[in-house]
Amino acid sequence: MSLYALCEAIEATALSAAIRESLWLFPVIEAVHLVGLAILGGSLFVVDLRLMGAGLTRQSIAEVEQGARAWFLGALTLMLTTGVLLGISEAVKLYDRPAFFLKMITLTLGLLLAFTARRALIARNPRGGAFSFAVGALSTCLWLTTAVAGRWIGFS
């Protein structure tokens, strides 16, 4: 089965049709997705700023990350759930959108960085340094690209 055929099959499901055909369902799911984006962005940015030596400098990076972790995980769960619902409602449209594929690539890289290198760095070096700055800057760039690419899907 080709990727395009899979997109057509996903879009033919009852759930996809219900979201697509409802007057309010898609906008409500999208609004919740955007609230999740704001929470996710805030929880990531506060830690990335601390990694880069700015913001909440009286606390260790580990303390800032620990305080933001529940917000990050909750927002990530919310965004993944609503993102899947939005995606299945217009799977064929997304198939032709380079912005969607850019979003998926940077989302994957951002998640890998957040759950591996960034977490290991924070555990080993709670006060920061040049490498911490680079990881914070890379994380910020990946997540901003994910958000901008997601917004660009609607314009492409």
Image (spheres, rainbow, N blue to C red):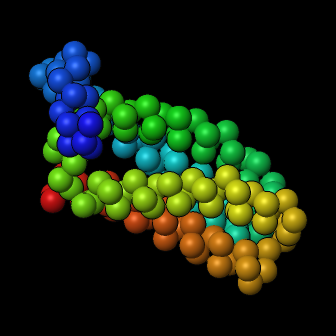
Q: Is residue 60 visible?
A: no
Q: Is residue 35 visible?
A: yes
Near-viewer residue (13 or 151): 13
| Residue drawn at point x = 45 percent, y = 61 percent | 106
Up-down relation of residue 17 to residue 41 (above or below):
above
User: Can you give x and y, in whole percent of width and height, for residue 137 in the image?
Assistant: 58, 75
User: Can you give x and y, in whole percent of width and height, for residue 66 in the image?
Assistant: 76, 48
Q: Residue furthest front?
A: 1
Task: Choose top left, top right, bottom left or bottom right for residue 63.
Answer: bottom right
| Residue drawn at point x = 67 percent, y = 39 percent | 70
Q: Residue furthest bottom?
A: 130
| Residue drawn at point x = 37 percent, y = 38 percent | 83
Residue 69 placement, left or right of 26: right
User: Can you give x and y, in whole percent of width and height, for residue 75 in the image?
Assistant: 53, 39
Quarter of the figure that contains the N terminus: top left
| Residue drawn at point x = 60 percent, y = 56 percent | 112
Quarter of the figure that contains the C terminus: bottom left
Up-down relation of residue 88 to residue 93 (above or below):
above
